[in-house]
Image (spheres, rainbow, N blue to C red):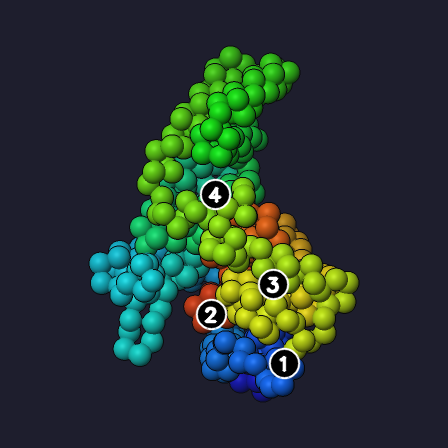
């Protein structure tokens, strides 16, 4: 009986069922993208091997084991080992840059015999644990601003290593999780407003410099910011610091732009003008929107997607799998998919708000932030609202490392929920 109980995770059953249905939906979509479509005279090769479906089945089994382990492991023990695990993940990231094989110009994997692992995925888990450990110990004390700045410096460690691989999309996950954690931590609202305005300044500066070739968009933004600062009646020091942060961010954008890889620059430029390279860097975004638009309300029906079946849609089993959902299952199917994620996220926020232990609260917030960023960013990319960055849809996209990471994080959420039920 005890063995059977170990095979069923404790905690919130809604979270576990959401994970289960998402994984089943993933297998259904992956089966579809590997099925040949019936042409006028013959079945056409889908261009994606059926092996990826069976690989995902194997990784799903491994992910379930990871979920069970994370759900049953004592939170206090995870709190105690958070720092050494994080340091170990940084070591793996460094080893990846030193010894990892270059695949398509990137060093993101470590080969362990026949198995390849992606250390950046382990780093996501260890980062959430170490941040929960550090913030949980200081949440009831003073000097929150100082601890917030220290946590930002800690966040930059894995970000810089992952940017060197290069992997811009994954590096931004750490920043997004940090924002969620420090918001829950109780960081002053002015700091978050300052960070958001600096990001807006960077966007307007980039648009002025690279797209519009005119200083006016950024100049108008700064004028609007000045007006907002005047109306907000901030003290002189805060207003000057915020304004300087916006100016320095805008000035630094050209330097950051020059440091980016050529393909990254093209992706961003194509986002502003998809027709710039319609058969190159803009092809994915254009075909993705065509696929989603073709689906309509109820889709073209399962296994019948032409954009997918005729191989017009690139990366249809990984980064653009949401486009296949939109094409074959339509708005209705896409809404069901997003509702499953919403259940997982909503329940995670609930358990973060009622958990008594600070470490448990921050673990739940970190996991929720991870899923929010991944889901919102992936859907925004496939619908053309953000530049292509190569970020998978968790639990849905093909990929063993991400499936295992996401399943372990769901297990941590179940672990926290089990403690809140027992309190």
Disc on the earlier residue, 4 or 3: 4
Residue at the image point whose x is 25% and y is 60% from the top: 95
Q: Report the residue marked by disc 1.
A: 39
* Foreground disc of the pair 4, 3: 4
Q: Mark 2 or mark 3, which is nearer the start of the sequence? A: 3
Q: State yes or no: discs 2 and 1 in contact (Cβ < 8 Å).
A: no
Q: Which numbered disc, 3 or 1, marks the residue that appears first in the sequence? A: 1
Which residue was labeled with disc 2? 399
Q: Position of residue 220 (x, y in %)?
A: 56, 21
Neighbour tally class for label 2: few under 14, some 14-19, many 20 plus, Cα within 10 Å: many
Viewer-nearest residue: 192 or 69:
192
Mark nearest the camera among 4 and 2 is 4
Image position, residue 110 (x, y; %): 30, 67
Q: Between label 3 and label 2, give the one nearer the viewer.
A: 3
Q: Quadrant of the C terminus?
A: bottom right
Distance Cα–Cα, label 4 vs label 3: 23 Å
Residues under labels 3 and 1: Cα distance? 24 Å
In front of the other: 420 or 65? 65
């Amino acid at each position: 009986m005890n063995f059977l109980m170990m095979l069923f995770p404790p905690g919130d059953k809604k979270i576990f069922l959401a994970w289960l249905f998402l994984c089943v939906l993933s297998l259904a979509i992956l089966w579809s993208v590997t099925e040949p479509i019936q042409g006028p005279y013959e079945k056409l090769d889908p261009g994606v091997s059926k092996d990826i479906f069976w690989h995902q089945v194997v990784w799903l089994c491994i992910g379930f084991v990871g979920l069970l382990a994370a759900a049953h492991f004592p939170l206090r023990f995870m709190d105690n080992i958070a720092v050494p695990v994080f340091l170990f993940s940084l070591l793996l990231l460094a080893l990846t840059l030193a010894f990892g094989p270059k695949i398509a110009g990137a060093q993101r994997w470590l080969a362990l015999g026949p198995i390849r692992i992606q250390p950046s995925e382990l780093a996501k888990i260890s980062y959430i644990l170490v941040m929960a450990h550090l913030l949980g110990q200081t949440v009831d004390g003073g000097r929150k601003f100082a601890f917030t700045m220290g946590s930002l410096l800690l966040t930059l460690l894995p970000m810089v290593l992952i940017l060197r691989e290069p992997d811009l999309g994954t590096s931004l996950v750490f920043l997004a999780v940090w924002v969620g954690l420090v918001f829950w931590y109780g960081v002053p609202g002015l700091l978050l407003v300052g960070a958001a305005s600096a990001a807006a300044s960077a966007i307007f500066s980039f648009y002025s410099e690279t797209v519009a070739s005119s200083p006016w968009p950024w100049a108008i933004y700064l004028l609007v910011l000045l007006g907002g600062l005047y109306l907000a009646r901030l003290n002189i020091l805060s207003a000057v610091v915020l304004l300087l942060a916006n100016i320095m961010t805008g000035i630094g954008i050209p330097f950051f732009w020059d440091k980016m890889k050529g393909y990254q620059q093209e992706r961003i430029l194509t986002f502003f003008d998809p027709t710039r390279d319609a058969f190159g860097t803009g092809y994915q975004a254009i075909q993705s929107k065509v696929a989603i638009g073709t689906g309509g309300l109820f889709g073209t029906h399962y296994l019948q997607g032409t954009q997918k079946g005729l191989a017009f849609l690139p990366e249809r089993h990984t980064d653009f799998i949401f486009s296949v959902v939109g094409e074959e299952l339509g708005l209705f199917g896409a809404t069901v998919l997003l509702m499953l994620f919403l259940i997982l996220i909503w329940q995670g926020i609930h358990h973060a708000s009622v958990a008594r232990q600070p470490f448990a609260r921050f673990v739940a917030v970190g996991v929720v932030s991870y899923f929010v960023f991944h889901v919102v960013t992936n859907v925004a990319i496939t619908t053309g609202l953000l530049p292509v960055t190569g970020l998978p849809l968790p639990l849905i996209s093909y990929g063993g490392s991400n499936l295992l990471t996401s399943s372990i994080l769901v297990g941590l959420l179940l672990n926290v929920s089990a403690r809140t039920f027992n309190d």
